[in-house]
Image (tube, helix red, strand yellow):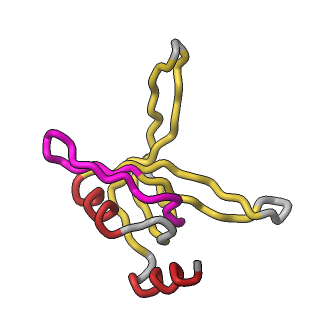
Amino acid sequence: MNKITLIGRLAKEPEYKTLQSGSTFCKFIVADNHKDKDGNEVADYFSCKSFGKSADFVGKYLTKGQKVAVFGRQITETWEKDGVKQYAQVVIVSEVESLESKKKQEEQEDLF
């Protein structure tokens, strides 16, 4: 069984696109901040791709810094660059939920 659940913040603005076929696609990164074994603050970054309704939601309503829950499955993408095989772990999103109200996010933006 391949299921992944992430809770974190969007590390940058989502990249939302409408493909030639008319379907929608959104690429975004979720950052998970936590402390390592020495107590230092560190972050892990997860590349996520969503399609259709979940892409529409992310692209239209979510912005950098917003706290989200992401549900999906993890895959390994492979490609070749300059004759060398490249690999990347990507989360294919089935569902996304905002964990902050719009008002809460606006209050946080006012602090910066």
Query: Residue placed at 38% from the left, 68% from the top?
Result: 62
**Relative to residue 98, is residue 38 depicted above or below?**
above
For the view shown, which residue lies furthest in the right direction? 38
In this picture, residue 18 sits left or right of residue 71? left
Magenta part of the protein: which range? 8-27
Residue 46: x and y in percent read 53, 51
**Relative to residue 88, is residue 78 depicted above or below?**
above
In this picture, residue 74 sits left or right of residue 42? left
**Is 89 a magenta residue?**
no
**Is 24 a magenta residue?**
yes
Query: Residue placed at 52% from the left, 83% from the top?
Result: 110
For the view shown, which residue lies furthest in the top direction? 83
For the view shown, which residue lies furthest in the left direction? 22
Looking at the rendering, in which quadrant would you find the C terminus? bottom right
Residue 100: x and y in percent read 44, 79
Residue 43: x and y in percent read 66, 58
In this picture, residue 54 sits left or right of residue 12? left
Query: Residue placed at 50% from the left, 86% from the top?
Result: 107
Residue 105: x and y in percent read 46, 80
Depth check, front residue: 41 or 11:
11
Counting every numbered tag in the picture gives 0
Query: Residue placed at 44% from the left, 48% from the top?
Result: 91
